[in-house]
Image: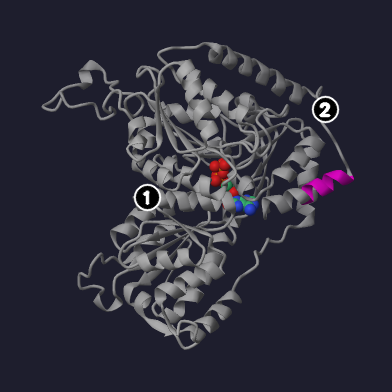
Amino acid sequence: SVNSQNAEIDGNVLAAKSLSRFGATHMFGVVGIPVTSLANRAVSLGIRFIAFHNEQSAGYAASAYGYLTGKPGILLTVSGPGCVHGLAGLSNAMVNTWPMIMISGSCDQKDFGRGDFQELDQLEAVKPFTKFAVKAKDIRDIPNCIAQVFNWAVSGRPGGCYLDLPTDVLHQTISESEAEGLLKSAENLRETLANGRIVSSDIELAASLLREAQRPLIVFGKGAAYARAEGELTKLVEATGIPFLPTPMGKGLLPDTHELAATAARSLAIGKCDVALVVGARLNWLLHFGEPPRWSKDVKFILVDISKEEIELRKPHLGLVGDAKKVLEMINKEIKDDPFCLGKNHPWVEAISKKTKENVSKMEAQLAKDVVPFNFLTPMRIIRDAILEAGSPAPILVSEGANTMDVGRAVLVQTEPRCRLDAGTWGTMGVGLGYCIAAAVASPDRLVVAVEGDSGFGFSAIEVETLVRYQLPVVVIVFNNGGVYGGDRRNPEEIAGPHKDDPAPTSFVPGAAYHTLIEAFGGKGYLVGTPAELKSALAESFAARKPAVINVTIDPYAGAESGRMQHKN
Ligand code: ADP
């Protein structure tokens, strides 16, 4: 009988049970040989399986899910090509330092090396994109392997992990009672996070550097968001009156509208600060490597990061290895014992606030115009206002594309933490639909709004079917300017050779009816080209909280090539 302790279960069932025991509540993926039964078993154990059209999008979803929830996002793929497609998500998780587990079926172990169906040395293939990878060589390894990937994904600096499940292992059987024993001992492997040891003299030093600074600045990034450090950051900023600067995905930990926000005075803030407390943000290209000419050569960096390697790489004036929330809690405590506050009339605070006001009013003057055919600014202002009107809980904003993301970052307002997902550390394009799906299932109380370029949308546009199938509250707004950067921008002398009549490499079909894609599956599509049309589409789709695509016609000559990265193209 099914309930008998002597009933046999196979590797698929044992893997599903192990995932459930380790707290998995969602999985993303594409099923097929040999993992279909694993997905079905997981569902029957209460795990929500979101089935995608391709593993790339599913992988992006898993990576973002890890960031949003702090639990590893799980991607399930078939062997060989499925695993290779999944590497997109795995590498994205690694580069952004988000916890993720990719589980791939693989070919029969006895046929490996003989050209088996979808054969690949998957452990080797995932190596550059994982912090830990393991193969279950026998059904009895499964619970233990799952314990290990769960621990590795979230411990220290979060990242991607990989579990390989060969076909023969998934088909092997053991008794229920033996399985139960294995599950119990695997559960004992569950580790509590080691928090690193923070030296109290370093905390004292950090506090005194901030206290003695003439022009202090607090910079925070998506590592601080991941650490859920918003409460401690708010306390620190409000107690000390130090201006702050979020990275793009750090936006919202404190509201963009806060009077100490230096976002609109970014060049001044980073160019002139003498002490910068940088929390959960790498001094990589996004922060100009912390070097002149963008930063002053004498700036003293205090870096807070969970990763010792990161701190060793940057050689800051002071490095604090630990969880952002814990470290800030300690700094706050230290400051409370000997408080200081810059105040509104402090010359540094005044300078930043003056510059902010100037830049904001310049931008507002641009935004106030209703430009038709649409440039990037007019529709972005209308979207900003609609998002703000949506109130709290704030929608999760997904953003990608060159011009669309650049303009969106400056115009759209983030008021709540972890409500912005964009191309991230790698500048990955094509993440949008996967991120939307992850955001909708991870935060069911929030509306998800994607503001995408037409090229970013096109990477995985078919996933609008997934939105409709699961009825997710996602509104995808496509800035349609007819191509990458916007149609054909070649100089006449660049147009030559036997294929000169082909469309430009940057161009797509002009006036593509992207809104009809979602209608093919029963979702709602809108085509808009004027402020009134856009406002009405936003009002209707935000209220409906149903899958929708708003196709916004943008002047193909608006915007810059390569967004703001012209020098690199
Ligand atoms: P951004 O793109 O916002 O600048 P990065 O991805 O460059 O942010 O940096 C995030 C940093 O946060 C990484 O170096 C990572 O090691 C670190 N990090 C991750 N989790 C934590 C945590 N819990 N506490 C502190 N730092 C963390």
Mark 1–mark 2 distance (CA, rounded to whole Å): 49 Å
Residue extending furthest right? 337
Amino acid type of disc 2?
Gly
Residue 391 lies left or right of residue 11; in this view the side is right
Residue 332 lies in magenta, yes or no? yes
Amino acid type of disc 1?
Gln
Residue 383 lies in magenta, yes or no? no
Q: Which of marks 2 and 1 precedes in the sequence?
A: 1
Residue in the picture at 33% in, 62% down: 78
Relative to 492, is 51 above or below? below
Image: magenta residue range: 330-337
Residue 118 lies left or right of residue 454; in this view the side is left
The majority secondary structure of the magenta stretch comes to helix
Residue 213 appears in the figure: yes
Q: Nearer the viewer, residue 297 or 96?
A: 96
In the picture of the structure, the residue carrying the numbered disc 2 is 343
Residue density around tag 2, few if under 14, some if 14–19, many if 20 or more, within 10 Å: some
Residue density around tag 1, few if under 14, some if 14–19, many if 20 or more, within 10 Å: many
In the picture of the structure, the residue carrying the numbered disc 1 is 56
Q: Is mark 1 within 8 Å of ligand 1?
A: no
- Residue 541: horizontal and vertical position, in percent? 49, 31
Q: Residue 29 bears which disc, if any?
A: none
- Quadrant containing the C terminus in the rendered view: top left
- Quadrant containing the N terminus in the rendered view: bottom left
Residue in the picture at 35% in, 42% down: 460
